[in-house]
Amino acid sequence: MVVISPSGLAVPRRRRILGAPSWVLASATVMALLSLVPLGFVMWATIQTGMETASRLIWRPRVGELLLNTILLIVFTVPLCSVLAVALAWLTERSDMPARRFWAWLSITPLAVPAFVHSYAWIGLWPGLHGLQAGIAISVVAYFPFLYLPVSAAFRLLDPALEDQASALGFSPVAVFFRVVLPQLRLALCGGGLLIALHLLAEYGLFAMIRFDTFTTAIVEQFQSTYNGVAANMLAVVLVLCCFALLGLEALLRGRRRYARLGSGVARHAGVKRLGRWRYPVLLLPVITAVFALGIPAWTLGRWLLAGGTAIWQGNEIGLALTQTLGICVVGGLATTVAALPIAWLSVRRPTRASRFLESCYYLSSAMPGVVVALALVTVTVRVALPLYQTVATIAIAYIIMFLPRALVSLRTSIAQVPVELEQAAASLGRSPFRALWSTTVRLAAPGAAAGMALASLGILNELTATQMLAPNGTRTLAMAFWALTSEIDYAAAAPYAVLMVLFSLPMTWLLHHQSRKISGR
């Protein structure tokens, strides 16, 4: 029996009623269960340890010290990043500042420099740099682009009619900004601030290099030095609780206000504000930011490259690290993109409560630090699937858990732009659900899949802790080689690896900038 679709094509009734192919739902469910492994590990570790032992390990001075460091780091870094990002976004999107397109791209470019390379660069200039102040300063220049991207996009999409009405009521430009514009940036500020806070929880290399203790540095040190699984697991429990607290705080601050424009017509683009005599003095902000975020890494890397000369360019070692890095990025990026395809299709074609629940599992797990994901997979593979321990499959699973949302966002946007009638037409011609999906939606969504794979690969390229703990013996990526040499205080030999990481990351930052402007129609 057949039914007629809205496009006039005959579609088998059974397929239409069942909706999603069984293999799509099964694949999405398996990936969701896989993503929940770190959370299950944390719960299992707490139960296995016992409440008495767990309480003794959690309620101790060392944990309090790490928690205070974490809170202070987030409390100072996120607001400073917010102020800097909003100021730069307003200058590059709303003012007539000279060369604002160029400064907009430079404001995103610091993402091409891994956070631990920022730390390496600053220590190269100031060897005595360490502690909370150093952590805040380096974190601001390394992570503010995560706020600049959504805030600048929000500025491009704001309807200036509200600002015009406020000005007509007699409000000063400063009052209009704080009472009309800034409240409309709440979603962007909350989302970007949450992303930065989660990165601060997960970061290892940046803080280990400046000798600033966090939960992640303490977990890695215990795991690598004494393999103290119980103590490391309890620190991981506190770290995950911090992640949940941040997620809850972001949801509370975000609220449920309406931000969409309601009314007839199309919102116009905001005009450019004339800065007058301040047009050139305001250049000091993007210039100083670029000097600290890009100039210091460039200067330090150049200085160490000149000091090391040609001797530091060890062709065989660098070639091996580059080859293995590209191989891991390709394998991990491809696996992540393929794993994201089922849930991306479900979220667009079958947006039910079940699909939204599965999607939330992915985002929840991706918020967990890489060290917790690595500890979970180490425990599971050692106790249940020992042949998988330190294999390519295990590290690929870790990358899927950590970076799947990056591929999911790009895939979901591309699939939404493919007419569902094409799949129905392919099915009506007798093709199986898999072949119908492959020959239509997957092929037409290939550009989005490529972008998602590139963004996931960028995260894999700069990932350090999970790769160190899970990669097969003999693996030496650019990040691992760089970290090993800096641990030996051989900064000159580490410079080529840092340069290669930055060079391979630069195209990804351009892609982020291009996509951000494309989404807003600019």
Image (spheres, helix red, strand yellow):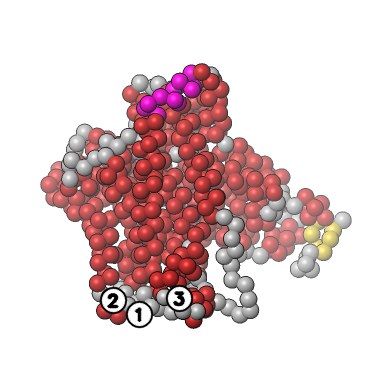
In this orientation, which residue lies closer to the viewer: 97 or 361?
Answer: 97
Q: Which residue is mark 1?
A: 274
The amino acid pointed to by label 2 is: Arg
> Residue 57 in magenta?
yes
Q: Quadrant of residue 295?
A: bottom left
Q: Earlier in the sequence, mark 2 or mark 3?
A: 3
Which quarter of the picture shows residue 323? top left
Left or right: residue 172 compared with residue 500: right
Question: Quick check: 435 above or below 73?
Answer: below
Q: Residue at x 47, y 32 (%)?
A: 238
Q: How many marks?
A: 3
- Between 434 and 506, the one lying in front of the other is 506
Whether the residues at callouts 1 and 2 have beta carbons within 8 Å, the answer is yes
How far is the residue under mark 3 from the one under mark 1?
Answer: 18 Å
Residue 505: percent from left, percent from top: 35, 53
Magenta part of the chain: 53-63
**Mark closer to the observer (2, 3):** 3
Provide the residue designation for mark 3. Answer: 171
Viewer-nearest residue: 220 or 167: 167
- Name the residue: 53% across, 29% down: 41
Q: Which residue is mark 2?
A: 279
Whether residue 319 can be seen here: no
Amino acid bearing label 3: Phe
Residue 208 position in % (x across, y down): 30, 36
Residue extending farthest right: 1
Q: CA distance from mark 1 to mark 2?
A: 8 Å
User: Looking at the image, which residue is at 59% across and 50% down?
Assistant: 341
Q: Secondary structure at mark 3?
A: loop
Cβ atoms under marks 2 and 3 closer than 8 Å: no
